């Protein structure tokens, strides 16, 4: 793991139906730095987008071979519960 990364200072964005895309079984979001598709799997496993990893996403018309990217990516899951229903 990258313990030297300062994730406190990292930019954050919310994922929603408009920011999450799907192509031929792969779910991805747009890398905020280079705009390449960043599959959820690569973000979670490598912390990098597909532009950095040179990994084409099937069915997506984006040539990752021409891309270099320095973005470190991490997904977070925010969690809260419904407050107790009041009677
Ligand atoms: Zn990128």
Image: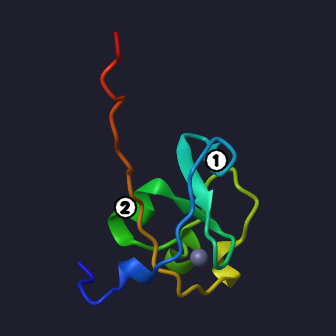
Asked whether mark 1 and ligand 1 are closer than 8 Å, the reply comes as no
Choose between 86 and 60: the one closer to the eye. Answer: 86
Question: Looking at the image, which residue is at 43% across and 64% down?
Answer: 43
C-alpha gap between disc 2 and disc 1: 16 Å
If the image is split into quadrants, where does the N terminus sit? bottom left
Q: Up-down: is 44 above or below 1? A: above
Q: Up-down: is 36 above or below 8? A: above
Numbered mark located on residue 21 in the image: 1
Lower sequence index among marks 2 and 1 = 1
Visual colour scheme:
rainbow
To which residue does mark 2 refer?
Answer: 44
> Residue most toward the top?
87
User: Based on the displayed image, in which of its 4 quarters is residue 25 positioned?
Assistant: top right
Numbered mark located on residue 67 in the image: none
The picture places residue 22, in percent across and down from the top left corner, at: 62, 43
The picture places residue 87, in percent across and down from the top left corner, at: 34, 9
The picture places residue 49, in percent across and down from the top left corner, at: 52, 71
Q: Up-down: is 71 above or below 27? A: below
């Amino acid at each position: 793991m990258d313990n030297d990364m300062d994730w406190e200072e990292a930019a954050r964005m919310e994922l929603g139906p408009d920011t999450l895309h799907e192509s031929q079984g792969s779910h991805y979001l747009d890398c905020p730095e280079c705009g390449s598709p960043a599959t959820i799997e690569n973000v979670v496993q490598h912390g990098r987008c597909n532009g950095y990893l040179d990994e084409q996403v099937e069915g997506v018309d984006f040539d990752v071979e021409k891309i270099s990217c320095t973005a470190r990516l991490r997904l977070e899951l925010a969690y809260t519960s419904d407050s107790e229903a009041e009677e």
